[in-house]
């Protein structure tokens, strides 16, 4: 199962990162909690969901984010989230189609 870090900051801006398999969630949580009062950045090993699933390090300043949490999804849950039955995915797909039609 894959681990994810979800954060919500000022103006309800939400960000979601999939963590690398090697990520130590407990250690990252401890660093995020301690860095919030010091206003320092915490390195988080993440995976970019592009065509190559590129592994990167994202530097997060927890003092700038109001809420953060870790959660796990099974492969089946991830596939269901990306299915056409998901209203958010449908809306994004529709916007992409409209943008493509506008470029023609």
Image (cartoon, rainbow, N blue to C red):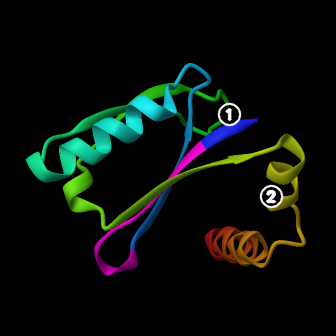
Which image quarter is the C terminus in? Answer: bottom right
Count residues near mark 2 (Cα–Cα under 10 Å), then give few for <14, some for 14-19, many for 20+: some
In percent of the image, x 33 and y 68: which residue is there?
A: 9
Indicate whether 61 appears above or below 64. above
Give x and y (percent) for residue 88.
Answer: 71, 75
Indicate whether 30 appears above or below 84. above
Give x and y (percent) for residue 89.
Answer: 75, 69
Q: Residue tagged by mark 1?
A: 51
Give x and y (percent) for residue 75.
Answer: 84, 41
In percent of the image, x 34 and y 38: which residue is there?
A: 30
- Left or right, 82 with respect to 2, comes to right
Q: Residue furthest top?
A: 22
Indicate whether 2 appears above or below 17. above
Alpha carbon of mark 2 to alpha carbon of mark 1: how far? 15 Å
- Number of the front mark, 2 or 1: 2
Q: Which mark is residue 73?
A: none
Residue 27 is drawn in which quadrant?
A: top left
SS at mark 1 in the image: loop
Q: Nearer the viewer, residue 45 or 72?
A: 72
In percent of the image, x 87 and y 61: which residue is there?
A: 83
- Left or right, 55 with respect to 50, comes to left
Residue 19 is drawn in which quadrant?
A: top right
Residue range (magenta): 4-12
């Amino acid at each position: 199962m894959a681990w994810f870090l979800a954060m919500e900051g000022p103006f309800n801006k939400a960000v979601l990162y999939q963590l690398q398999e090697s990520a130590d969630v407990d250690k990252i949580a401890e660093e995020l909690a301690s860095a919030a009062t010091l206003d320092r950045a915490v390195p988080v090993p993440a995976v970019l969901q592009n065509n190559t699933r590129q592994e990167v390090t994202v530097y997060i300043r927890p003092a700038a984010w109001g809420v953060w949490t870790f959660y796990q999804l099974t492969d089946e849950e991830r596939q269901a989230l990306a299915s056409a039955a998901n209203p958010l995915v449908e809306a994004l797909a529709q916007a992409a189609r409209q943008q493509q039609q506008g470029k023609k």
